Image (tube, rainbow, N blue to C red):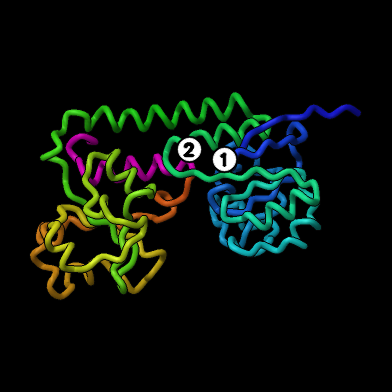
Amino acid sequence: MDVNIVHLTDDMDREISIAEKPQKIISLSPANTEVLFALNGNDKIVGVTDYCDYPEQVKSIEKIGDYINPNIEKIISLEPDLVVANAEHKEIVETLERLDIPTIVLRPLDMENMFQNIELVGKALGEDEYSKELVESLRERMNDVKSRISGIAETDKPKVYYEIWYEPLMTAGPGTFIDDLIKLAGGINIAGEAKTSFPEISLELILDKAPDIFIYSHHGDSQMELEEIYERVNWHNIPAIKNRQIYDIDPNIVQRATPRLIDGLEIIAEILHPDLFK
């Protein structure tokens, strides 16, 4: 029986040929898994990492190990006809190539890359039209946010401190989706000019930058309660603290390259400019 072949170029400029409409797919990251589900590929996924946790249905899918060191023997045993990997999986990808297991490598660096990856995976799944429709709808939502905040002068944009961790203090700088979302939502990231993507930051610098809005995500750290932040020693003069402008957000909707980034954008935009999103 003849099998149609689809030819793709992934984010590492690798030319890949895969059978049309793969039936056994393995995802090597939570973000990739979300994208596959968003493109109706859920009934084709036979393996995911231990960290893949969304949507709920993913919990019943076979696990192939952690993100950094997935179990190559387990992957092979599942006989996939497509593996969706990331740039960090270089050695795994090389092994899969030697075994003639088709593998797409994604390396999303910004919102535009995220949209491109959705269409790339859509083409791999035989869901070209659906992926384009999905991207179009996501762009419309993003553009709606842009339109609403377009009249805000730079001097009127609120300064935002995004806290990833407390001890030590860690924030999100340039080259992160968080930084992109804050800017797209009409805010100024106080760490936007940092030298690294996820820098440690001093209380002195936070005090100097005087953020108007404080957004945090501590990856499920139940010890970090909102009122505890308000009671931090020496933080009381920060505008966000004085005006009780502290908000928590699910880290997975602002750090994973998935369609849920647009959910994160809308939430942040409403935090920063509530009057524009009533």
CB under 8 Å between callouts 2 and 1? yes
- Three-letter amino acid code at the position of disc 2: Asn
- Three-letter amino acid code at the position of disc 1: Asp
Residue 273 at what x, y percent from top left? 20, 40
Residue 21 at what x, y percent from top left? 73, 33
> Which residue corresponds to mark 2?
113
Disc tally is 2
Drawn side of residue 7 relative to residue 153, left or right:
right
Classify the position of the C terminus by image quarter.
top left
Q: Is residue 263 magenta?
A: yes
The local crowd at label 1, few if under 14, some if 14 to 19, many if 20 or more residues have their Cα within 10 Å, is: some
Drawn side of residue 122 relative to residue 111, left or right:
right
Camera-nearest label, 2 or 1: 1
Task: Kindly state the secondary structure of the residue where label 2 is placed.
Answer: helix
The local crowd at label 2, few if under 14, some if 14 to 19, many if 20 or more residues have their Cα within 10 Å, is: some
Residue 254 at what x, y percent from top left? 39, 49
Hey, which residue is sitting farthest right in the picture?
1
Look at the picture and state if 250 lies above or below 4. below
Residue 130 at what x, y percent from top left? 58, 27
Q: Magenta segment range? A: 258-278
> Which residue corresponds to mark 1?
11
Give the residue displayed 8% in from the left and 65% down from the top.
Answer: 237
Drawn side of residue 234 relative to residue 164, left or right:
left
Checking the image for residue 71, the label placed there is none
Give the residue displayed 20% in from the left and 41% down from the top.
Answer: 274
Q: Main secondary structure of the magenta part?
A: helix
Quarter occupied by residue 208: bottom left
Sequence-wise, the earlier of marks 2 and 1 is 1
User: In the depicted view, which residue is nearer to us: 153 or 21?
Assistant: 153
Look at the picture and state if 109 lies above or below 89. above
Give the residue displayed 56% in from the left and 30% down from the top.
Answer: 131
Task: Kindly state the secondary structure of the residue where label 1 is placed.
Answer: loop
